[in-house]
Image (spheres, helix red, strand yellow):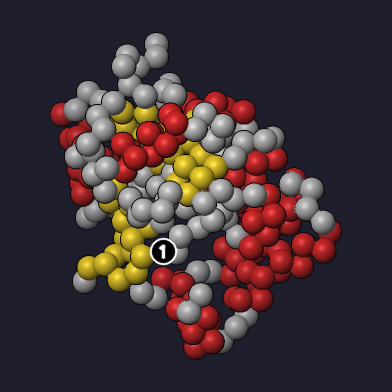
Amino acid sequence: MRSQNLRISVIMGMYNCESTIAEAIDSLLNQSYKRFRIILCDDGSTDNTYNIAKKYSERFSSITLLKNECNKGLNYTLNRCLMKADTEYIARMDGDDISLPDRFQKEIEFLDRNPDIAIVSCPMIYFDENGDFKVGKNNIPYPEISDFIHGTPFCHAPCMVRREAYIAVNGYTENKRLLRVEDYHLWFKMYAIGYRGHNLDEPLYKMRDDRNAFKRRTFRNRLNEAYVRHIGYRMLRLPFYTQIYALRPIILGLLPNWLYSYLHKNK
């Protein structure tokens, strides 16, 4: 049965985030917009994440809690959440981040005013134990197909998407070659069948990160990004020469750390 009077389902995969999950859930409960439900799925955590989330689900009827028997990856986990989502809009959230209080209000107002737009996202504020250290760049307000050549046009964690768009593309594709780039592939699929999106100017989401996170990006992740670019460019029928850009993640992964660090800080 469809949730009564609720318009947003928040889907969150959790994995070993016992020290941050309470703050993440609290940031949702403190939203100025209240007509939403939260669907959590623990992806085989080995710490106390599930038990902390269970206490919230027992206290708040608006929270649904699921659990994978073992670690399955984010694409599988989010699809489990989507199966429970029955509202007009689907919002994302990660278990170690923070949604600012007016995030849902501003995102849903934009989507309500613009029925031709299916995806809305925003820049993110990056923070660690010492506080905020970077505000992400403002992405292109209305990305076109050609904008996919240089990277994903939307931040995944702060997005809100019409449920009909998720249904039209059968949710996230469950493929090990898409781990860590499942969002980029999702946008490729949506744009390929005519859906479009918008990036708000204002940062409404805080991503917990560290200042050297780029150094931990594995070569496997880079291969996955190269793969999703390759198939995504073809999905959008981009010119063949654009395939050269599919090699960019691999090339960057081969750079010396000092050079990549310089390029990362100055992009």
Question: Furthest residue to the right?
Answer: 240
Can residue 76 be seen here? The reply is no
In this figure, which residue is indicated by the disc labeled 1?
Answer: 136
Q: Residue at x 33, y 21 (%)?
A: 6
Residue type at tag 1 = Gly
Question: For mark 1, does the 10 Å Cα neighbourhood hold few (<14), some (14 to 19), or many (20 or more) residues?
Answer: some
Q: Is residue 18 above or below residue 104?
A: below
When asked about the image quadrant of residue 54, the answer is: top left
Q: Residue 233: x and y, percent?
A: 74, 53
Can residue 132 be seen here? The reply is yes
Depth order, front residue of 35/75: 35
Q: Residue 63: x and y, percent?
A: 27, 29
When asked about the image quadrant of residue 244, the answer is: bottom right
Q: Residue at x 60, y 60 (%)?
A: 151
Depth order, front residue of 72/244: 244
Q: Residue 35: x and y, percent?
A: 28, 26
Q: Secondary structure at mark 1?
A: loop
Q: Residue 220: x and y, percent?
A: 59, 65
Q: Is residue 126 left or right of residue 20?
A: right
Q: How many marks?
A: 1
Question: Furthest residue to the top?
Answer: 1
Q: Residue at x 36, y 48 (%)?
A: 94
Q: Is residue 117 above or below residue 236?
A: above
Q: Is residue 171 left or right of residue 37?
A: right
The N terminus lies in quadrant = top left
Q: Residue at x 36, y 44 (%)?
A: 93
Question: Furthest residue to the front?
Answer: 113
